[in-house]
Image (cartoon, grey):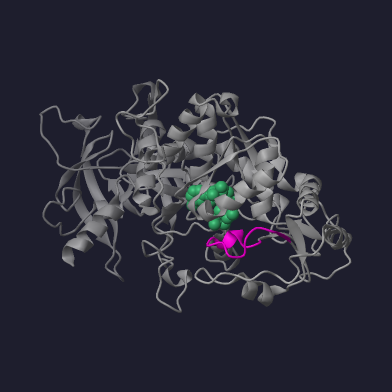
Amino acid sequence: MTSDTPRDDDNAGGVSTRGLDFIRQIVVEDRQAGKNEGRVHTRFPPEPNGYLHIGHAKAICLAFGLADEHDGLCNLRMDDTNPTTESVEYVRAIKDDVRWLGFDWGDRFFYASDYFDQLHAFAVQLVEAGTAYVCDLRGPDVGEYRGMWNRPGRNSPYRDRSVEENLDLFARMRAGEFEDGSRTLRAKIDMASPNMNMRDPTIYRIRRVPHYRTGDAWCIYPMYDFTHPLSDALEGITHSLCTLEFEDHRPLYDWFLRNIDVPCQPRQIEFARLNLSHTVLSKRKLLQLVEQGHVSGWDDPRMPTIVGFRRRGYTPEAVRDFCDRIGIAKANSIVSVAQLEDAVRQDLNKRALRVMGVLRPLKLVIENYPEGQVEQVEAVNNPEDESMGSREVPFSRELYIEQTDFHEDPPKKYFRLAPGREVRLRYAYFITCREVVKDPQTGEVIELRCTYDPETRGGYAPDGRKVRGTIHWVSAAHAVEAEVRLYDHLFATINPEDVDEGGDYTDVLNPASLETLRGCRVEPSLAGAPAGSRYQFERQGYVCVDPDSTKDRLVINRTVTLRDTWARIEKARAGRQ
Ligand code: ATP
Ligand code: MG
């Protein structure tokens, strides 16, 4: 059964598969059928040539999640057969990221490069069986002989070499007698196959490049299509899950397992890769963004990488929840980044401490509040969770409020502060704006003179009078200065890969993806908060302390706004068109 829409009567030998995605159905059925003695063993096989992104998170949640659900195992394997692009920095980062997501590979951390000897022996097995040969065709000729999807290929003139000659040539390839690109070892399959992958694919190529782990030990390197099924078999993998682009490679995957004497027969199953709106999910392109300085690094909070998310303040729970919500299917599609942000909001809503932070401060003086007096008002830490308690926030005569919370000439439905108008200062008092002080040069409002009603402590009037606006504030003398970084989508279009001919995805980078606000003022409770601490700035969004912070400098990332303002903007825009 390979349908990805669950059916009511789905049933595998008594265990219901109802509601399961198509891969989970297959696994249940395989167990019921007694395949692999009922074992479930998966793997996550990244190539250490970049940092992991949200697409990888989907694959990780699937591989590790599936193993967990069946009391099985999941290996972490570095798929490191390409010597030119891999590095230990990436290996370390991948381990960190998988752990951060909440998964554990136990003692099963492997490198495909650890199998180089074994893989070489497997290749010799093929040569001895007459199913692999050394081919002297070079680059352009290989393509010419391979044909096209609609035109069969032709046999290589070297295809019928004897086993002895092939063994000798392959040994000399390994010994470094031939120059790079001058010969390859190829599987002898079928040059007329409608599947291009089956037209005598390359197994080994000559490359005199040191490998980040094996150094100069090898000058021939095995190809991915050969390495992958055999690594899976060597590790006892039962279900080898990968993305859709490998579907056409499956016959080759199976061919290697059939033609080589291996300890187990893993089953490859493909699922749709995750595409996320307003970003790119290709390590090559992400690396380019880093190298060309479009972002500050792999962990720039605008990057769709796990390290970027972590720095921005996303939680592993939110990322896993998102992966759960999008599910596993067989058709490619683009998932809106708003869905990811929604998962982040939902998670942070439960756990984030509410605090007051003023992003664009405007000074406010309460003329009838005694100079030098300070009182502590009680503020709720999280209205969603009483057990998180409350804290005291200092209140005094001079405060900062948000510039946008005052309007000299308020439009309709603007209920915040305006000349002569009374509003509530959150957790504190009712205040009334008496006077507006302006910069004589620029005319800009620089200070508000107000009075407060001492009877309204806690934000309620004993005479029952109501105000329509409640605004946040900080005490000027007590507040901590901070730099706050606001983020928008890295790309201005939904699908940055889809650009006009001759264009490039960097053409559609969003020039306003980062806005840095300096001189922001936040509650004193944030002083000295360690990097990674998460809060909700009331009315402004969820935030997280950035590692750029030092003892005397507080740097804050806005993780996500409180509501999906982006979706509203898009909707309004669509309405206008
Ligand atoms: P990229 O295209 O970003 O370079 P990749 O597929 O080459 O990605 P790998 O390191 O080979 O990167 O990926 C490891 C695993 O993660 C593979 O099994 C791959 O199928 C899976 N994977 C990669 N990108 C996605 C994605 N966008 N959605 C789901 N799974 C993905
Ligand atoms: Mg890959």
When the figure is inspected, residue 544 is found, relative to residue 82, above or below; the finding is above
Quadrant location of the N terminus in the rendered image: top left
Instruction: Identify which residue is drawn at 77% across, 47% down.
Output: 122
Which span of residues is magenta-colored? Answer: 186-200
Q: Is residue 114 left or right of residue 1?
A: right
Q: Position of residue 425 (x, y in %)?
A: 26, 39
Decide if residue 564 is in sight here.
yes
Q: Is residue 308 visible?
A: no
Residue found 41% across the figure and 63% down from its top: 491
Q: Nearer the viewer, residue 533 or 53?
A: 53
Q: Tell me: 43 left or right of 465.
A: right
Quadrant, the C terminus: bottom left
- The answer to if 280 sits in the magenta stretch is no
User: Which residue occupies 58% across, 72% down?
Assistant: 147
In the displayed orientation, state which residue is furthest to the bottom: 502
What is the magenta segment's predominant secondary structure?
A: loop
Q: Residue at x 73, y 65 (%)?
A: 159
- Residue 195's place in the image compared with 308, above or below, is below
Residue 387 x/y as whole percent: 38, 21
Image: 50 above or below 233: below
